Amino acid sequence: FWEARGGTRLGDDPRQRDLSIAETRLQLEAEKYFRGATLRLTGDFLYDDLDDDRSVDLESGEGAFDLREASLVFSPSADTDVKLGRQILTWGTGDLVFINDLFPKDWVSFFIGRDVEYLKAPSDALKVSAFSSWANLDLVYTPRFDADRFIDGRRLSFFNTGQGRLTGRNAVVLADRPADAFEDDEWAARLYRNLGAYEVALYGYDGFWKSPAGADPASGRARFPPLSVLGASLRGPVGPGIGNVELGYYDSRADRDGDDPTVRNSELRLLLGYEQEIARNLTLGLQYYLERMGEFEAYRRALPPGAPVRDENRHVLTQRLTWLTHSQNLEWSLFLFYSPSDRDAYLRPRVGYQVDDHLSVEAGGNLFFGAREETFFGQFQDNNNLYLGVRYGF
């Protein structure tokens, strides 16, 4: 497909440009079948008018080319599939809320108005899927850590805890990323099966926090501390709709005692969700999400004087409302994140129209609200934006 997008900020942010997005991209796909294997390639040729450096960086997705997929798929046996190379990986039950999905995300794309498909960043990994009558197993090995394409200040302003203020292009985050192949690696696993109409799954992860969750006290550079996660999920019919529950324990291995203020504490995360068609072509989805910090008292005692204090429990409610009209060619969507504990919110309105089999247009926004600038959504208030997009598929 070919796509063009443009967007503007709704307020004045002296740390950023007035435009939030100004780009055009051409995505090409190729697939080649060999005897017993399939080679798949997907790449985006991109012109981003807001990118100061157009040199290609396949890790960050910046520059004139972004390689979305370069994988080889084959089946060594009747009950085993293997996928090797660059690929988009995902699992879990949440709707724009991720607990056991520890694959890289592109939060910059998500907040500036790119298509939601770009929230999922590619991984360079080996995925092995084994199937049996009892259960199915997915095992993913990433030989070198794949971090999120995280917010570093170049496109979005945020609350810099090290400086105690909002920063943007005036103070871009410098990070020490684990980068030694086969040493700074990641393992992820999912064991799942159906129990009647319900799917139950167990998850495991061993690697690092995907976005910076620590800082080097000497240099001030951001770090990705070691992280292990164990979790589970259940999804299936509940009354006239579909319900899901998912939980995960985040073991922050570098600060299990919770007394290191430069490393994020361990956490327990919980998600409850429900989706139902409440009228013809009108669907409502609701979610409750909890982050409970471990060793909270140790964390609070270790904070330096004057530092903002996170809540022990962060509560988030989400609502997705989707309405299809004009023979389901026009989609009206409203997604709301609201945190009663942080007293902040994030609103994602969107309307998209499928003109014909090839052409589609859309308009939307990213709107942030908050009582304090150090909360998760509150820190992005100066990044409020509206965008327009057009896509031609072929």
Image (cartoon, rainbow, N blue to C red):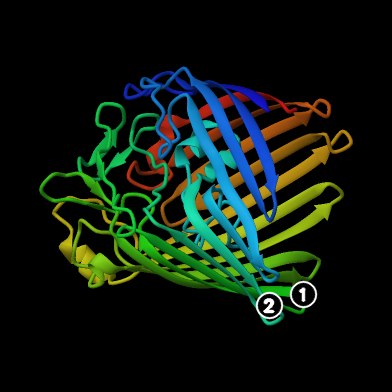
Q: Residue furthest left?
A: 218
Residue 364, horizontal then vertical, whole percent? 62, 31
Please give left or right for residue 386 compared with residue 250 in the image. Answer: right
Q: Quadrant of residue 91?
A: bottom right
Mark 1 or 2, nearer chain start: 2
Quarter placement of the N terminus? top right
Residue at 20% in and 59% down = 261
**Residue where numbered disc 1 is placed:** 197
Residue at 51% in and 49% down = 85
Three-letter amino acid code at disc 2?
A: Ser
Label drawn at residue 182: none
Q: Residue furthest front?
A: 35
Please give left or right for residue 350 compared with residue 282 in the image. Answer: left
Q: 218 or 121: which is nearer to us?
A: 121
Note whether 275 is above or below 219 in the view shown: below
Q: 139 or 349: which is nearer to us?
A: 139
Residue 316, horizontal then vertical, whole percent? 50, 57
Label 2, residues with CA under 10 Å away: few <14, some 14-19, many ≥20: few
Quarter placement of the C terminus? top right
The answer to whether residue 90 is visible is: no
In three-dimensional space, the C-alpha distance between marks 1 and 2, rounded to whole angstroms, equals: 18 Å
Please give left or right for residue 344 compared with residue 134 in the image. Answer: left
Label drawn at residue 132: 2
Tag 2, which secondary structure?
A: loop
